[in-house]
Image (spheres, grey):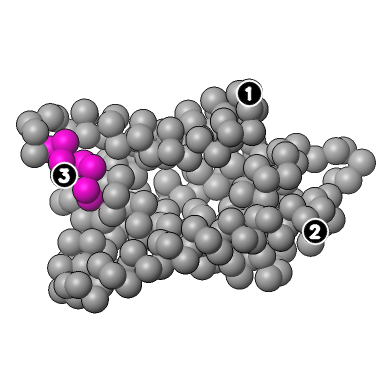
Amino acid sequence: MNEITTLKDRIKTGWILVSISSMLTISVIYWYINNPKRFIENGWGYSPEMLLNLPMWFFTLLIVIGYISYTMIAIPYVKRNLLTFSWLKLIGIWAAIVSGIVEEVVFRHLLMDYVLSIGLSNLSQVLISGIAFGIAHGAWVLLRGEIKIALPAILSTTILGCFLAMLYIYTGRSTFAPIIAHILINMVIEPWLMLSAISGKWKINKSLK
């Protein structure tokens, strides 16, 4: 790992990710044990025919590549550590899987289906889902008081949320593809995105490149 963050920052990031991932894992296990069939079909959104839906996978891949590329440009620290493997990366992979599942169930399946139930259009569903997703992901930056970083973070994750919402609608309101996209994105950019937020190392000093 390129040591431009302190051990204290890395340990703090690890504890935060472990705490969040533990709670999310408990949620996933509870949903599954409570009703396995419903979890797989509705929560996970899986059906065998989806594996052969090439347009869906193309759309999914575009979202993944697009957001990862943006993140590497916007936050050089993420790009610098892209191929780094460590104990913190293992925690990041765990966090990527459970957060991808839970967040897509909440922001796509539950939220968008609720908005649909009160009679709002697909466009409204996409916008509401995207904005809620963006605000939720920008909150941790706002807590640091870094408005210049928070606004782009909220905007970029809002756009990502809108694309994931469109993917959800495109696939017949299945969370399967959005979950896969979300997990893949997080597996690449985490835990480095969280570590950059904790340490404040958004940019990299040219002398360290």
Q: Secondary structure at mark 2?
A: helix
| First in sequence: mark 1 vs mark 3 | 3
Crowd tier of the residue under label 1, counting other residues whose Cα lies within 10 Å: few below 14, some 14–19, many 20 or above: few
Residue 155: percent from left, percent from top: 48, 28
Residue 198: percent from left, percent from top: 67, 45
Reply above or below: 207 against 95.
Answer: above
Name the quarter where the N terminus is drawn.
bottom right
Relative horizontal placement of residue 27, taking residue 18 as reference (left or right) = left
- Which residues make up the magenta segment? 109-116
Residue shown at 57%/31% (left/top)? 142
Which mark is in front, 2 or 1? 2
Q: Which residue is mark 3?
A: 113
Image quadrant where residue 40 sits: bottom left
Q: Secondary structure at mark 1?
A: helix
Residue 117: percent from left, percent from top: 8, 39
Q: Which residue is mark 2?
A: 7
Residue shown at 29%/49% (left/top)? 106
Q: Which residue is mark 1?
A: 148
